[in-house]
Amino acid sequence: MNNTEETDFRRVVFYSRLTRKRFYRLRVINMLSFIQMTKAEKSLYEKIYDMVKRIPKGKVATYGQIARLCGIPEHSRLIGYALHNLKPNSGVPWHRVINSKGMISLPRSGGDYDRQKKILEKEGVQFIRDKIDLSKYGAASLLSETMRKMTEK
């Protein structure tokens, strides 16, 4: 046992009078609950990726729309985190997700902004002063219709 474990053990024993065996059992339980939380988080990311895959070419959706359709309406930033964690060549069309103002959220420096804009323009999405007309190119109604059909089955 190293010094930090010994210190943790003494602190726990002092406050709760646990035996050394029970202390390690609790540590294992805590580690398992962390792994389960990670699995739940992965399944949520998979749900987000599945929803983003449903956005058709030439259409866009906002982070908030994807969050609402995934059942997490107050967590639109989580959609950004999930898309940020995508592996290269994952097949998820991350470029079709934009902010609620109809603009690309990526910073202009670094090249990712230009990359996303070029991909969207190649798919037929038009920009007017760096904005996308969500009433013309928004996929919210298509996505919500797809979700409605899925829940009816």
Image: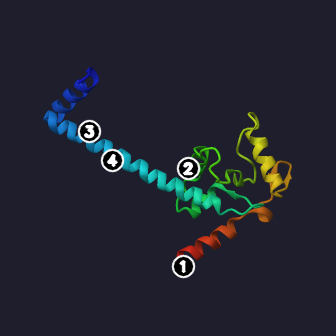
Instruction: Name the amino acid, label 3.
Output: Arg
Instruction: Name the amino acid, label 2.
Output: Leu
* Distance Cα–Cα, label 4 vs label 3: 10 Å
* Distance Cα–Cα, label 4 vs label 1: 34 Å
Instruction: Name the amino acid, label 1.
Output: Glu
Give percent across and percent down for residue 131.
Answer: 81, 52
| Label 3 CA crowd tier, 10 Å (few <14, some 14–19, many 20+) | few
Sooner in the amino-acid sequence: mark 4 or mark 2: 4
- Closest to the camera, between mark 4 and mark 2, is 4
Rendering quarter of residue 152 = bottom right
| Label 2 CA crowd tier, 10 Å (few <14, some 14–19, many 20+) | some
* Distance Cα–Cα, label 2 vs label 3: 29 Å
The residue labelled by disc 1 is 152
Instruction: Name the amino acid, label 4.
Output: Ser
Residue drawn at the location 73% of the way across and 53% of the way down: 101
Q: Secondary structure at mark 3?
A: helix
Sooner in the amino-acid sequence: mark 1 or mark 2: 2
The residue labelled by disc 4 is 33
- Closest to the camera, between mark 1 and mark 2, is 1
Sooner in the amino-acid sequence: mark 4 or mark 1: 4
Residue drawn at the location 70% of the way across and 45% of the way down: 105
Sooner in the amino-acid sequence: mark 2 or mark 3: 3
Answer yes or no: do the residues labelled 3 and 1 have beta carbons within 8 Å?
A: no
The residue labelled by disc 3 is 27
Q: Secondary structure at mark 2?
A: helix
Q: Residue furthest front?
A: 89
The residue labelled by disc 2 is 78
